[in-house]
Amino acid sequence: MSITIDQAFSKQFEREVHEAYQRQGSKLRATVRVKNGVRGSSTTFQKVGKGAAATKARHGIVPVMNVDFSAVEATLVDYYAGEWVDQLDELKTNLDERQVLANAGAFALGRKTDELILKALEQAKFVAGQASSGLTKDKVLQAFELLGDADVPDDGQRYAVIGWKQWSDLLNVAEFANAEFVGDDQLPWRGSQAKVWLGTLWMPHSGLPAEDGVRQCFWYHKSAVGHAIGQDVKSDITWHGDRAAHFISNSMSQGAALIDDDGVVAMPCMES
């Protein structure tokens, strides 16, 4: 086996894992604040409070806003996803099989990334509606009001992540699914990955926490949650002669934290 070929394969495999993770591994990473290249076991995200403007007398001192500053800590944790592979020579020449393994590692780490972000979202203090009902129009509007009352910016950086059952619930809401309300270009069945509604990008997700038949859905602003990255997705491939196989190890070091609980609304929904 050529050492050069082995090194080339390792580099190509790592690139494919990284690309798969970026493309499909995590659905929520792009919806929150991200800090890359963190050194150490934790990092902090800055939270800035609201300032107030005031008048001043002629030649008087300009009033100070007295804005509150605070820091939220995110602890990094190391995660791994490995797999044994026999007959690597065949794997090198078979693009489909190599891509299957690359995707498997990337998707496993991507699910863990989303799990970290969802854990942070679970700390939301605002709750819209009752857990005894599904995702109704009234529940959506109540969450919409809570975000507005908290002065959460309506700047195109709001996201709502819901379960597939809740996505089906919304298909029964005319204002969500009827072209007369949303226009032909925003019909949800044109693509079930995401849809813009009420100035928010809505998307279904299979990994939302659920307990006793109640699924936790979330509506939030990008600045409300932080995702820290010490090491992005990385792959290592080593040969083990006693097993006549290569071991592919995928790893990352990441953490997440709720920065501003005013910017998140939980929407508990019963799944019957």
Image (spheres, rainbow, N blue to C red):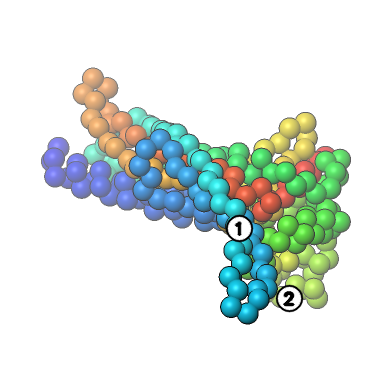
Which residue occupies 59% across, 63% down? 64
Q: CA distance from mark 2 to mark 1?
A: 45 Å
Which residue occupies 27% across, 40% down? 90
Expressed as whole percent of the image width and height from the top left, the position of residue 93 reads 27, 47
Identity, as a three-letter code, of the amino acid under mark 1: Asn
Q: Is residue 96 above or below residue 82?
A: below
Tell me the mark number nearer the camera, choosing from 2 and 1.
1
The part of the image, by quadrant, that contains residue 9 is top left
Task: Please state if 179 lies on the left or on the right of 258 as rendered.
Answer: right
Q: Is residue 137 above or below residue 232?
A: below
Q: Residue furthest front?
A: 59
Which callout, 2 or 1, points at the residue further toward the start of the chain? 1
Specify whether residue 81 is in view. Answer: no
Expressed as whole percent of the image width and height from the top left, the position of residue 222 reads 58, 57
Q: Which sits in the foreground, 101 or 44? A: 44
The N terminus lies in quadrant: top left
Task: Please state if 220 lies on the left or on the right of 135 as rendered.
Answer: left
Expressed as whole percent of the image width and height from the top left, the position of residue 115 reads 56, 40
Q: Which sits in the foreground, 101 or 66? A: 66
Which residue occupies 63% across, 79% down? 58
Residue picked out by circle 2: 183
**Dots 2, 1 in contact, CB < 8 A:** no
Dot 2 crowding, Cα within 10 Å, few <14, some 14–19, many 20+: few
Under circle 1, the secondary element is loop
Specify whether residue 55 is in view. Answer: yes
Task: Please state if 20 lies on the left or on the right of 49 as rendered.
Answer: left
